[in-house]
Amino acid sequence: MGRQRTKPAPTPPTTTRGRRTRDGLILAGREILEQRGWSAFTPEAVAQTAGVSYGTFYTYFESRDDLLHHVVRSVAGEMLAASLVSPDGVDDPYARLVESNRLYLRAWDRASKVLRLVDQGAAADEALRQIVHEIRDFYVGRATKGLRRLQDAGLANPDLDPRLTALALGSMVEQVAHARSAMEEPYDEDTVVDHLSRLWASAIGLQGAPDEGWAARARATAGTASD
Amino acid sequence: MGRQRTKPAPTPPTTTRGRRTRDGLILAGREILEQRGWSAFTPEAVAQTAGVSYGTFYTYFESRDDLLHHVVRSVAGEMLAASLVSPDGVDDPYARLVESNRLYLRAWDRASKVLRLVDQGAAADEALRQIVHEIRDFYVGRATKGLRRLQDAGLANPDLDPRLTALALGSMVEQVAHARSAMEEPYDEDTVVDHLSRLWASAIGLQGAPDEGWAARARATAGTASD
Amino acid sequence: MGRQRTKPAPTPPTTTRGRRTRDGLILAGREILEQRGWSAFTPEAVAQTAGVSYGTFYTYFESRDDLLHHVVRSVAGEMLAASLVSPDGVDDPYARLVESNRLYLRAWDRASKVLRLVDQGAAADEALRQIVHEIRDFYVGRATKGLRRLQDAGLANPDLDPRLTALALGSMVEQVAHARSAMEEPYDEDTVVDHLSRLWASAIGLQGAPDEGWAARARATAGTASD
Amino acid sequence: MGRQRTKPAPTPPTTTRGRRTRDGLILAGREILEQRGWSAFTPEAVAQTAGVSYGTFYTYFESRDDLLHHVVRSVAGEMLAASLVSPDGVDDPYARLVESNRLYLRAWDRASKVLRLVDQGAAADEALRQIVHEIRDFYVGRATKGLRRLQDAGLANPDLDPRLTALALGSMVEQVAHARSAMEEPYDEDTVVDHLSRLWASAIGLQGAPDEGWAARARATAGTASD
DNA sequence: AATGAATGAGGATTCATTCAT
DNA sequence: AATGAATGAATCCTCATTCAT
């Protein structure tokens, strides 16, 4: 009796061809967001980039926002993948830090463009903003735990609030990743990872980190000089 | 013959009332950008928020992008003001670092929302993106010079690339400012400034910084323990 | 904090010009519905018929359905007006019946096209269908009361269910009005009103109605014949 | 040269299975029109309701309008069947009237939804509207002939125009059928048929009809009262 | 200066129909 | 004969901007 009024809600494709088209659209959408920004993210542009016709877009997505959801989820998935890879096989804390920073730098590099659009309120969708927050929380949470472990082991400065410190140093990585991708002549990845890791290590007073020696030498020199 | 002027090309207001209306529009535009994002930044919404009628908007601004220019310039001005205030009267490097971080934290807090929109390519206007880059450059440039001076004075780790380090630590402050303003229960400002400053100081190995002692003590303890 | 997401909801015009434009759109919409049916009822066609530009439509109406609401309300208003005019000053029940039928014939004539579209589910809007039902109910309700009064006064057949009878005879008027307007060569109004009234009167056995004599004469004749 | 055929032009199904699928689609189309209106009458919805896949629709029908044709023809067929059943075996005019009204009430009940859609100009197809007119004409024509016969036999009021009267009373039946099917708690069929028949009979002054006596009694009473 | 109505190009979405499998 | 993905013209709606008062 009651009349149906909800849109058919595009069904997931059943055939291989369908899945390929759909994935192509998501990928195209992501590329457009990354390279040309929100204002270029139109169904028409996405369809064209994916090499399909205009209406095909709506065979797979309810709306432009629906595609955005899928793109964001795809990006979020990559970020989380970067977190999980982080190898526990390595013993040396500094080496692990370097590895972790490299992964995150890469992950944020690709992700930040898309995630910030959402953050900026491009789409008026609370659920999306939630996803972005969760990613940051996950990232910071991981770093917080790592720092706390080091502090407990007496390998890092115990006077730092682990969470706030993790937030600050994680922020550093995120924003550097973003800034780097906007540069005309970006710093070389190794250089950036090296610096970020050394700064991070020194900031938390990590025992056995590369720049650890400098302070001692400096004090020694200063002592000599002042004598 | 006579010059053909399609558009009246809004003249700067001559009366006090005019100036007040104009400033009100700029302020309204800024508030909307900060609180509701780019998609809410419509001439109609701005006019309504400023409490004037729809058409009045175009009495003062050529276009929506024109207003955006003014908003961005206003924000940029605040950022630069924060830089200039930076007190040279203080002698202690760490104290100056704290003061500087506090000012930037505040400045980025307000500015980041607006500047990132531009960064995101909200407006297809190269000139605007230029302004944003200049602000960042100015900020990083200042920090770079400061760091170099410290290195030259033997007060900071000379093995760090000054520019990349300044970029990284400046990024930390910027992103923390942004993250803080998005939090439900933000950290208290003093706490944040304190942590950022200590992390910054430790990261560059600043002589005489609060956490300097920890490394020595840790080594001593470690030495004792291993004996 | 919460972001606003409801459409501005077009404000009623404040100026005379605005009101004129708005009324023109409603009128144009009604004419299109009456003359060219639902499928021709597009914002573009309405605007063009009203002699205004495309976008002006949306200055006054949220959507095509919004305009339909206004059109239906306007039609409904006319139907009700027809009911209220019905003169109580006339004493003779049959004369009043004729007057009433004439008014309803005219009212249904114009209204039926529009109201049936709604009835047919052109717009998926329950509220509209409700309005149509209310009009019919009002009409039938009036006729029901009139019949009951006549029955109580001994002037109409008391064996008839007043409501069902009112529904049936009212239906007759409505459908005749509709059928007439669809004819190539419609019956003349006076003829139709005369017939409807006589049929209605005879159907309820109204005392003093024009055809009352026939039955008696017929019986008399029949009697004579059979004699 | 060879005939160019853009479209395969659906052939009538040769297999039993094919016929069943085709009939299922027509039935599904009809149900959708009756229950959910014109706007829900999409090839997709029809196919889904019939339980076949999307593209199968076009295996059997050239277009949506093609299916509509078939549905209308099916409905029209039922209406005509109702007319033909009308039993000439019954002698009593009133009894025949009752039987006829019952059949038409049922037939219009189902048919009116679909036929009115066409009438409303849902499909921009003149041929369809023609079919609807023919049905009404047939119906009214039958009633006209019946009435004329009664008048000639001295059994009905000869002062009524047979065609206009048939139109009016037929309209009554049609519209009551339609109104009844839209009611929450419809009147019971027997009650409706009884009332429609009595009203019809009284309206034409049918000799020997149930309410005939009332007028005489009323006059008698009135006479007595006035004495 | 101020107002608010008017404009129309641009963008999102629908859906009848076609096509490859 | 059946399937469901692909197509794109047609349509609804938005909103930056212009204009008459």
Image (cartoon, coloured by chain):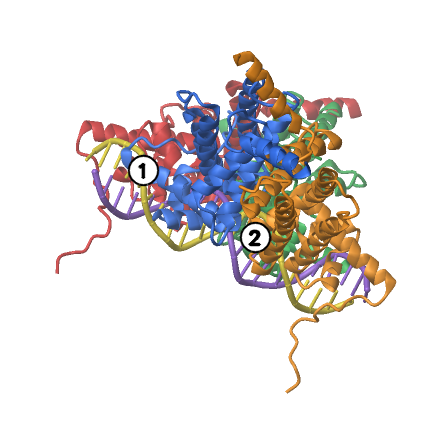
Chain colours: A green, B red, C blue, D orange, E yellow, F purple
At which x and y percent is residue C157?
Answer: 61, 23
Instruction: Look at label 2 and name its amino acid.
Output: Pro
* Label 1 residue SS: helix
Question: Are there few (<14), some (14-19), or many (20+) residues within 10 Å of tag 2?
Answer: many
Tell me the quarter of the picture where residue A21 sits: bottom right
Residue, far right: D16
Chain letter of the residue beneath label 1 in the structure image = C
Tell me the quarter of the picture where residue B74 sits: top left
Q: Residue at x 77, y 67 (%)?
A: D12
Q: Is residue D9 left or right of residue B68?
A: right
Residue, far front: C227
- D128 or B53: nearer the eye? D128
Tell me the quarter of the picture where residue C171 sits: top right
Placement of the N terminus of chain D among the 4 image quadrants: bottom right
At which x and y percent is residue C174?
Answer: 54, 37
Identify the residue under disc 2: A43
Disc ID at residue C20: 1
* Label 2 residue SS: helix
At which x and y percent is residue A158?
Answer: 67, 22
